[in-house]
Amino acid sequence: MKVLIIGSGGREHAIAKKMLNSPQVTDVYCAKGNPGMRSDDIQLVDIAEDDHEKLITFAKEHAIDWTFVGPEIPLLNGIVDDFQVAGLKIFGPNKAAAMIEGSKEFAKKIMVDNDIPTADYEAFTDYQTACDYVKEKGAPIVIKADGLAAGKGVTVAMTLDEALQALKEMMTDHRFGESGDKVVVEEFLDGEEFSLLAFVKNEKVYPMVISQDHKRAYDDDQGPNTGGMGAYSPVPQISNEMVENAVEKILKPAATGMMKNDTPFTGILYAGLIATEAGPKVIEFNARFGDPETQVVLPRLASDLAQVIDSLLKDQEPELIWSDQAAVGVVLAAEGYPNDYQKGMAVPSFDDQVTVYYAGVTDEQGATKASGGRVLLVEAEADSIEAAQTKVYQALNEADTTGYFYRKDIGAKSKK
């Protein structure tokens, strides 16, 4: 098989690398990909992810068997619809189904209509009305931009001032552009967060092993929200009963609810969940693999990922086997991220005890340099989370990370 991956980040690097492990796959192309991927024999395609016409032409000319979409923006731009109209196989939700991520309010309506446990909420387009509601409810409270905001459009406000400031930034300062023209205000839920992803084909749901992401920039969950500073899997403090409950009461009703809504979902459904005393509740849905969760979940997949996707596209039952090994991944970010950050630093090298997934890198005169906020992720597997942590942090501590920073506590919650 020849496979095309759409996207350029660490998530796409992990997906492409896993595809190449398949004995059935001869070629993996990534559009646009990034220079760090070349180390794994991934072939880069210099076509932007929003240039659907050129991507379709490429897929036809190179006899691509099917395409896998990594990021959310191409999904919401209708890349799946366009490929299907062109008669090409592609794995991911169409534009209508991708709205489960594209609009917080759309997702909330799906949850409410299908009795999926989630936080109480109200949606607002008027700034003053939103402020009045927040003052009435008090803090802690959660403020979310309704549209996409690169993982940064959520404020968990522990004080009233924080909440009002978040509303001002979203609705009057337009920090997230049109994505913040509408906001969703939610009750604050207390508990341990975890990520549960699944392969979905219409009403059929095939869950993956769970992981835990670390959104805050600094240790002990301090600092601003980011796109994710690291992740680990498994999450031993979340019981099997809690996960099974989430599959039955959240993932499966979401898939059937999308069918009833005439927006059937095919692709990767991501449920960002919180384990409360009343059971699991949904914080958010995404319409694709998470980043950095992908980089710790896929290494634990003992099955052939390419065969799993191929089976789903052919309406066949996929085989899913998961390793008992633990995986820990730590993001190396540019100083200043998620605000203004440095660029152009040399990218550190690492030994073969760890796996490196590249994201924000570019090629400058034959040298790989930092070009994004989250530059790369260092991942390792071992028999325990602690042993995997030791491998990752030893590699990072020995590298020259001048101009970078990383969290020192990824996976620490598993020991509490």
Image (tube, helix red, strand yellow):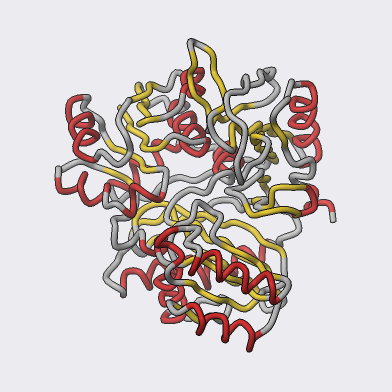
Residue sitting nearer the eye, 347 or 395:
347
* Camera sees residue 212: no
- Residue furthest right in the image: 416
Residue sitting nearer the eye, 173 or 289:
173
Compared to 225, does 6 lie above or below?
Answer: above
Along the horizontal axis of the image, is 387 left or right of 134? right
- Residue furthest left in the image: 86
Q: Position of residue 411 (x, y in %)?
A: 75, 46
- Residue furthest front in the image: 173
Compared to 280, does 176 lie above or below?
Answer: above
Q: Quadrant of the N terminus?
A: top left
* Camera sees residue 206: yes
Compared to 276, does 335 lie above or below?
Answer: above
Q: Position of residue 185 (x, y in %)?
A: 55, 76
Q: In which quarter of the image is the C terminus?
A: bottom right
Q: Position of residue 212 (x, y in %)?
A: 66, 52
Residue located 66% across and 18% down the image: 349
Residue located 53% across and 80% down the image: 130
- Residue furthest top in the image: 366
Along the horizontal axis of the image, is 97 left or right of 397? left
Q: In which quarter of the image is residue 100?
A: bottom left
Q: In which quarter of the image is residue 382?
A: top right
Residue sitting nearer the eye, 299 or 57:
57
Total residue callouts:
0
Residue located 61% across and 47% down the image: 228
Q: Quadrant of residue 148?
A: bottom left
Residue located 26% across and 52% down the image: 78
Q: Where is residue 98 in the image (x, y as percent from the top left)?
A: 36, 59
